[in-house]
Image: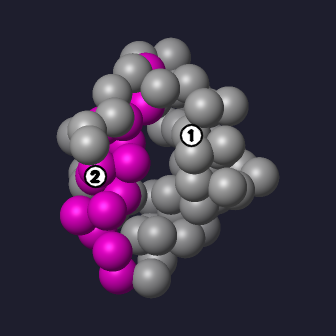
């Protein structure tokens, strides 16, 4: 089942996580790049923008560019 335009709260409940953005970054760091792409696509536009902001403030600069490139 495809999920699109979901809010942060909806994604947190669906995936049973406290912070969907943290979960997305951990997914990438664990080598599941395609899963990160799918999780990103599931987010609504505002949540996508918030994820990018989250990355700039919370993600190790070593991984930042690769994560951003994966989402676009």
Q: Earlier in the sequence, mark 2 or mark 1?
A: 1
At mark 1, the secondary structure is helix
- Residue drawn at x 77%, y 52% as measured from the top left: 18
- Residue drawn at x 28%, y 52% as measured from the top left: 37
* Stretch in magenta: 31-44
Quarter of the figure that contains the N terminus: top left
Residue 49 location, x and y as percent? 48, 25
Give the residue at the far front of this rendering.
1
Query: What's the mark number on residue 61?
Result: none
Asked if the magenta segment contains residue 46, the reply would be no
Please tell me which residue lies in front, 26 or 59.
26
Please tell me which residue lies in front, 1 or 21.
1
Residue 19 location, x and y as percent? 71, 50
Task: Give the CA separation, mark 2 to mark 1.
Answer: 14 Å
Quarter of the figure with residue 34 = bottom left
Q: Are marks 2 and 1 in contact (CB under 8 Å)?
A: no
Residue 18 placement, left or right of 10: right
Using the image, determine if residue 13 lies above or below residue 15: above
Quarter of the figure with residue 40 = top left
Residue 46 location, x and y as percent? 50, 17
Q: Which residue is mark 1?
A: 11
The answer to whether one can see residue 56 in this image is: no
Residue 17 placement, left or right of 25: right
- Residue drawn at x 57%, y 45% as measured from the top left: 14
Query: What's the mark number on residue 37?
Result: 2
Asked if the magenta segment contains residue 35, the reply would be yes
Using the image, determine if residue 14 lies above or below residue 29: above
């Amino acid at each position: 089942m495809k999920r699109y335009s979901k809010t942060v709260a909806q994604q947190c409940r669906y995936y049973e996580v406290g912070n969907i953005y943290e979960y997305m970054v951990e997914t990438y760091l664990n080598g599941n790049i395609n899963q990160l792409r799918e999780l990103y696509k599931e987010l609504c536009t505002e949540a996508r923008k918030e994820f990018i902001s989250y990355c700039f403030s919370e993600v190790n600069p070593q991984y930042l560019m690769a994560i951003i490139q994966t989402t676009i």
